[in-house]
Structure formats: C-alpha cells, structure tokens
Amino acid sequence: MQRKEFLKKIASRFDIDEEVVIGLSRPKRVVEVNFTIRRDNGELMEVTGWRVLYNDARGPGKGGIRYAPYVTREEVENLAFWMTIKNAVVDLPYGGAKGGVRINPKELSGRELEEVSRKFIDAIYDVIGVDKDIPAPDVNTNPKVMSWMIDEYVKISRKYDVGVITGKPVNLWGLKLREISTSLGGYYVLKTFLEHYNKDVKTIAVQGFGNVGMNFAKIAYDNGYKVVAVSDSKGGVYDPNGLDINRVIEVKRKTGSVVNYEGAKKISNEELLELEADLLVPAAIENVINEKNVDNIKAKYILELANGPVTPEAERKLVDRGVYIIPDVLANAGGVYVSYLEWLKNKGAFMTEEKAREALEHGMTSAAKSVFELADEYNSTLREAAYGIALKRIESAMKYRNYF
Ligand code: NAD
C-alpha cells in the first residue's frame, strides 16, 4: 500500500484530519549531494548521498545515516517518514529525518571511510544542526563513524555543539546505554505488553544475532526467559530446553557465527521462524515473514525489533489468526530514545547512566501503554494504534503551529 493510502486509512479510523495526510505525504526537504574521495590507490571515486528532512511539525529532524551500495533517494525518504512516525510514537520532541550515502563500506579502507564521513558532513553542513536536524548511526555506521562526523562538524563550526550528532562514543560525549538501548527498549515494551494483556511467554526465538538480536537475547535470558533458538546470516541453533546465551555470545565472538554452538540442533533461518516458540523476535532484516511462510508461523506474539520484518499481506493473515504483532515503530524505538537522552546531556542536562536507564524505561513503558490502550479503544491492530497515536500528535502540533 502506498504511504498516502495507508495514512488515509489510519486518519479515517482514528478521526484525524485528512489535511494531516496531505502534510505527511511528501518530504519537506530532500538534499542530494555529490562529492569525490581519493582512493588509497590514487584513483578518484564519485560518491552520492542524501539527507531528507521528512517533517518538522514536532521539532528538529532526527534519524540515522546509512552506508550501503544500494541506497536510493526513495529509500531514504521512506526511512525519514518512518522516523517521523517513530519519534512521535515515543513522544520525542522531534520530527523525522534520515540520511544515506551510496557506498559499499566493505570495499573501503578505514581511511577512505573517514574521508567519506567527513566529506558527507561538509556537504550537508548547512541543513544539519543541534536544533535543526540531528543525525545518528544506522546500517553500516557506528560510534567510530559518528566520531569522525562530529569532529568534522566542530572543526567547521568552531563551536562544541556536540548534540548535533548522537550515537557518539562513550568517551566522546556519548552514553554507554546506547549500545543496548534498542534491545532494552524492546524488552520494556514486551514487559508492558505482557502485563497489559495478562499474557505469558515461556519460550523465545530470536532471528539475527547482531547488536539488537544478541543484546535482546541476553537481556531476556538474564531476566529468566528461555531463549530456545537464535540465528545469524549463517544459520541457527535450537534447544527446546533453552540455550545458554552467555555461551552463544562467546561462540559468536570467537568463531563469527552462532551455528558453532555445541549441544543444540542446527536449524536454518527459515526453520527458526517456524518454530514452536511463544514469542518470535525478528531482529535481522525486512520482509522475513511473508506470504510464503506465514501459514507456518506458530508464534503467538511477534516483537518487531528489525524494521519491517512482516509484510502487510502476512500481517493481515497473522492478525486474523489472533497473533499479536508489536510493531517496529514502537518496539525498536529505544535506540532513538537514548539518542534523545544523549542530545539532552549534550545540551547541558544532568544525565547519568542510571538516570538514562530510568528515563528509557519510563518513556518506552508509557509509549507502549498508550498504544495498547488506543488499540483496545478502537479495536485496531497494534500497528494501526501506533500510527494513530503518532498522527494524532503530529496533527495537534500542525494545528497549533498553523502549519498550513
Ligand atoms: P547488525 O548488523 O548488528 O546485525 C544483524 C544480524 O542479522 C546479524 O547477526 C546478521 O548475521 C543477521 N542477518 C543478516 N542477514 C540475515 C538473514 N538473511 N537471515 C538471518 N539473519 C541475518 O544489525 P542491528 O543493528 O542488530 O540491526 C538489526 C535490525 O534492527 C535491522 O533491521 C535494523 O534496521 C533494526 N534496528 C536497529 C537499531 C539499532 O539501534 N541498531 C535500531 C532500530 C532498528
């Protein structure tokens, strides 16, 4: 479904003014930049990138920058729209934005990546700012990349406005909590879900064992849940009695994959998704639950830590069968939530790691409650309710500001 049609459906369901749909159907600003970098072999390489500010009714733009060989302007616009919704779902005082640079980071040396990062910041310097638009890490970018970016920004501006970029290293104005924030935020959302609907989860399967999947598996395991299966791009392992997640992490670190964990059954990624487990946590890539496998999915609950892991067609079938899907725009918003706390700290707020953890728990729990309550009130899916809350908040900001 096209963005506009989907928004229209949400607007009519939750009594939201159709003009909001018009306001949200196109990005406010799209900046395309072209520059060159010098490869280590002396050749010039041409690079294209984008920074999209989708909407700023609720505040400055906020969203990560991804590096990938397949990034397009359209993809960055879609992701910036997604950030507009996500930031509103968890009630952050931000609009939505996203950036993308079309490079293959695996083919570049560290020095070449640094040159790309600094030149991209040079190129988008005029449209970003601590109170204008605030980038962060995304696919293939990390705290190291953010440190090059913030250094470049500070060198150009000659001011320590370090909140302009979040997801920075801990010892360079960052927050340690950022490393596990998406997973911990997802865990708080899950806890709130189980309490609100009076449900119980005994077994969990996690697809993807990177930053998000690994940390989620560890948090769930440390809190007494039985994580029966995990996987990465090479495959997965399954033990109905529960895996020792600390040992899985060690195996992943030493050998590069969870498949080398001994004492459990080896399974494929497809098998993992179709296991008998109460909760399925896709934490790898998009569209993994689709029309092909939806009839074989046995989980009662799905916590979307990855972005867009369930296709709309599959969602319809799952919802009809009574499966609860806790949507990405709520479930994985813990990362941007802690980015917000880092931004506050950089603006001078008193922010310890303990305080940040408390704020994350409070923020994610209250966002989740609002979504579940709205879903109950309108008898909608959790995704519809999350979009409903976001649109109501954006509508209100647009009206107060006389946006049109
Ligand atoms: P990551 O690169 O650290 O980890 C990805 C994991 O997925 C790896 O274990 C990889 O082996 C596995 N994987 C890749 N292809 C796979 C496949 N075809 N089948 C099964 N597993 C596969 O990435 P991440 O930061 O953990 O992000 C995971 C997902 O969460 C992405 O969808 C990302 O957009 C989303 N997300 C991440 C954050 C964050 O803070 N990192 C925030 C919001 C959303």
Image (cartoon, rainbow, N blue to C red):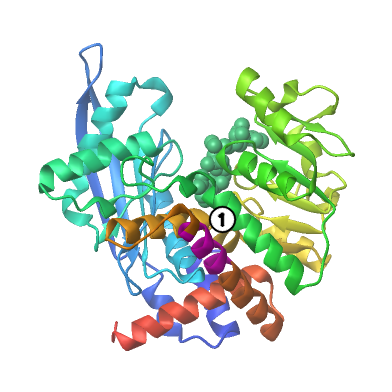
* Quadrant of the displayed image that contains ligand 1: top right
Q: Nearer the viewer, residue 248 or 300?
A: 248
Q: Which residues are magenta?
A: 355-364
Q: Confirm if mark 1 falls within 8 A of ligand 1.
A: yes
Query: For the point 79% across and 38% down, which residue is it?
Result: 229
Is residue 198 a member of the stretch shown in magenta?
no
Residue 207 at x, y percent in the picture: 69, 41
Q: Is residue 331 above or below residue 12?
A: above
Tell whether 380 sits left or right of 5.
Answer: right
Residue 298 at x, y percent in the picture: 85, 52
Overall secondary structure of the magenta stretch? helix
Give the residue at mark 1: 332
Is the residue marked by circle 1 packed among few (<14), some (14-19), or many (20+) residues within 10 Å? Answer: many
Q: Is residue 31 above or below residue 45?
A: below
Where the C terminus falls, by quadrant?
bottom left
Question: Is residue 180 at least partly visible in the picture?
Answer: yes
Query: For the point 41% across and 33% down, which residue is it?
Result: 69
Residue 74 at x, y percent in the picture: 40, 51
